Amino acid sequence: MTNQAPDRDRSPRRWWALAALTLSVLIVGLDGTIINVALPTLSDELGATSAQLQWIGGGYLLALSVGMLPAGLLGDRYGHRRLLLAGIALFGLASAAGSLAGSAGEVIAARAVLGLGAAMITPLSMAILPRVFGRDELPRAIGVWTAATAVGMPIGPLVGGWLLDHFWWGSVFLFNVPVTVLAVVACLRLLPADGPRVRNTKPFDYLGTLLGTLGITALVYGTVEVPGHGWVSPSVLAPLAAGAVLLALFVRRQRRTAAPLVDLGLFTDGTFRWGSVITVFVNFAVMGLLFVVPQYLQAVLGNDAFGSGLRLLPLIGGLMVAATLAEPLVPRLGARVVIPAGLLLLAGGALLGATTGPDDGYGLAAGWLSMAGLGFGLAVVPATSMVIGSLPEDGPGTGTSLLETIQQLGGVLGVAALGSVLNAGYLARLPVNGLPDAAADAARGSVTGADAVAERLHDPALLVSAHGAFVHGMSLTLLVCAAAAVLAAGLALAFLPRRSTTTEPASAPTTRPDTTARAGELPA
């Protein structure tokens, strides 16, 4: 059982502590997408090539995926707050360095260090939640924390677009610095102290760390190469195969070593196992939405980055409503009812989005985005609560790191797969016969490229065809997202426990003697 704060003697400042944690993950969500709107500017001002632009995003994902597993273990050993503060500080320093970069290579390096900081922030902030909130309030806290991680993604382009309209490209990095300073101060003042360090005599699993790092690196590297080379290219298949072999060796190592990097025994608990699987499916579907919808809002409906970010807010609004609803619904109906219902709502929103036509306006999109956000929240909040509730009290950081790593890898692979579906659907409906070779290649590259070709050639028919082709590809992508949500709903109905720790009446949880005194206690 997790080391959760007792229901008695709760500090009235615990919600301010939650604000500090959400601020820390909000900057991670923002930074994951804020750079996207700056890529054209970086290409112009720093001479970044297409491959370098790809690795400005890919390097961040790679470092983020690799850093999560050891971050959780180190947090369990040396203190969650200590490592969280170190991650936030690293994030701020890397942001400052990125704003001063003079070449594309320096930007890639700064983004990689940002990824390492984010890898420390996300799982460790989640691991702290049960120390601050009792079992009855934990679902609401997780809902707010989840909303913070999600809201940063669509708001990132909005903030980035505004900054680029008013300042130089380095402002998308410099923006993080005051936010990280505020987050450090808030965490120091509001989060419970780690207490004295406990001497850990178990050796650190360096071999496991090496195998896991190399395996995840190969897997993410191969996935990042998919858009440029396709799934059947040797430059994609070779690293994917190497990654699969290395991760298989990593799993074997974790099963045999006396001091594993991750506790694979967590998967023997049905609550952790199926809660983790469901959150992966949920994130796969939502990442698909966030991948295609901003492109639709900009390329087809003609909004700029700022306007597109605003038009994604119905998704966040639905999530916030669901976070409020989940707290009273789960104790009454049970997670086994609420989670499948949320997944089916998410699937319904995606299916409604798949009916979008090229001439449909924003009204339809606002409706199905709201439905999808509501379903997302009703599914992910109880599922995450279940997973956290199943973690051992002496190693919550390891468990949350394992969960976040699985989700991250699923998201990276999912976006690559869904990007292939979108591209295939787009190319299948795009007529380029009669166009010059260079123009045809540009039109096939993206709907934005097709728009530029149509404007240059004064060809309104190509513009209409390109928009129709993109909407067709988007519809196929949303159908895959809906199928993933329906499959997850079936798994939830079949395998989730009838009763979980998040649905039982809150009672005084079991805590270790050395942590009971400070659980739920916040600094004065």
Image: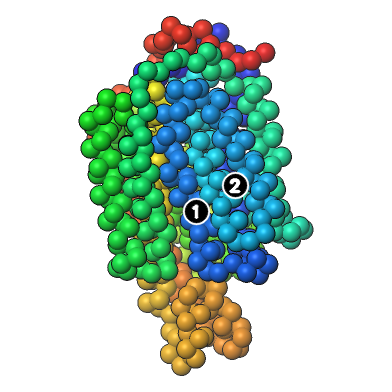
Return the residue nearer the eye: 262 or 471.
262
Q: Left or right: 159 with respect to 277?
A: right
Q: In which quadrant is the N terminus drawn?
A: top left
Q: Amino acid at mark 2?
A: Leu
- Residue with the most extreme right position: 166
Say which residue label 1 marks.
59
Q: Position of residue 86 (x, y in %)?
A: 58, 32
Q: Could you say where residue 276 lies in the image, as x and y percent from the top left?
A: 34, 37
The answer, for residue 298, to whether it is visible in the render is yes
Mark 1 belongs to which amino acid? Gly
Looking at the image, residue 406 lies above or below residue 47: above
First of labels 2, 1 by sequence position:
2
Task: Say which of marks 2 and 1 sits in front.
Answer: 1
Q: Nearer the viewer, residue 347 or 173?
A: 173
In space, the residues marked 2 and 1 are separated at their CA atoms by: 16 Å
Find residue 494 and report its image quarter. Answer: top left
Label 1 CA crowd tier, 10 Å (few <14, some 14–19, many 20+): many
